[in-house]
Image (spheres, rainbow, N blue to C red):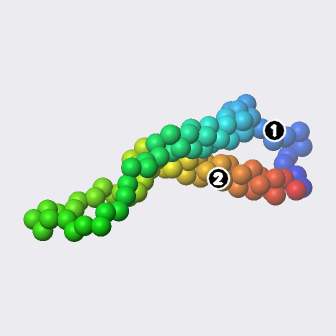
């Protein structure tokens, strides 16, 4: 421990790193919460199944994910991005803790 440090040299976190320790997890948490709120508010319930055959001259063209609205898809994507930021931050924090030992 400290074999590579010269006498009088101390490595202390820079102010930007101290700020990042607080800001990054907060941004990830805010992204998760906002994404969940957006996904929850854009739930689509207007679908159903009908017992008749469609006309032969019409073609069904569904949007991507016809059971999930575009707003819900966006909210879930933001939630996923927030979870990725939190996972990256947690791994980085655990890695720094392991190196300091």
Q: Residue at x 85, y 40 (%)?
A: 10
Q: Quadrant of residue 31?
A: top right
Instruction: Quadrant for residue 23, please give it.
Output: top right
Residue 86 on image: x %, y %: 65, 48
Above or below, 11 against 60 in this view is above
Instruction: Read off the residue under disc 1.
Output: 12
Residue at 61% x, 40% y is 33
Q: Is residue 92 visible?
A: no
**Label 2 CA crowd tier, 10 Å (few <14, some 14–19, many 20+):** some
Q: Provide the residue designation for mark 2.
A: 88
Of residues 26 and 69, the one nearer the viewer is: 69
The C terminus - image quarter:
bottom right
Q: Mark 1, mark 2: which one is toward the viewer?
A: 2
How far across and how far down the image is residue 82, in percent?
58, 46
**Left or right: where does residue 11 sit relative to residue 43?**
right
Q: Which mark is residue 45?
A: none
Q: Position of residue 72 (x, y in %)?
A: 46, 47
| Along the viewing direction, whichever of 39 and 98 lies nearer the viewer | 39
What residue is drawn where x is 19% and y is 65%?
54
Work out how far the residue at label 1 is from the one at label 2, CA to CA, in angstroms: 22 Å
SS type, badge 1: loop
Helix, strand or loop at disc 2? helix
Q: Is residue 49 above or below residue 34?
A: below
Q: Residue at x 46, y 42 (%)?
A: 42
Residue 6 drawn above or below residue 101: above
Tell me which label, 1 or 2, sits earlier in the chain: 1
Left or right side of 101 for 47: left
Instruction: Tell me the quarter of the image containing the N terminus.
Output: bottom right
Q: Find out whether the residues at labels 1 and 2 contact each other: C-beta distance under 8 Å.
A: no
Which quadrant of the figure has residue 16?
Answer: top right
User: Depth check: 73 or 94 in front?
Assistant: 73
Q: Position of residue 21 (x, y in %)?
A: 72, 39
């Amino acid at each position: 421990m400290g074999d590579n440090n010269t006498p009088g040299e101390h490595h202390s976190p820079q102010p930007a790193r101290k700020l990042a320790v607080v800001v990054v997890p907060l941004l990830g948490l805010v992204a998760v919460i906002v994404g969940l709120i957006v996904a929850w508010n854009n739930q689509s319930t207007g679908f159903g199944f009908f017992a008749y055959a469609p006309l032969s001259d019409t073609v069904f063209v569904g949007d991507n994910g016809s059971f999930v609205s575009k707003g819900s898809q966006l909210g879930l994507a933001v939630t996923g991005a927030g979870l990725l930021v939190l996972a990256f931050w947690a791994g980085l924090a655990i890695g720094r803790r392991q190196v300091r030992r």
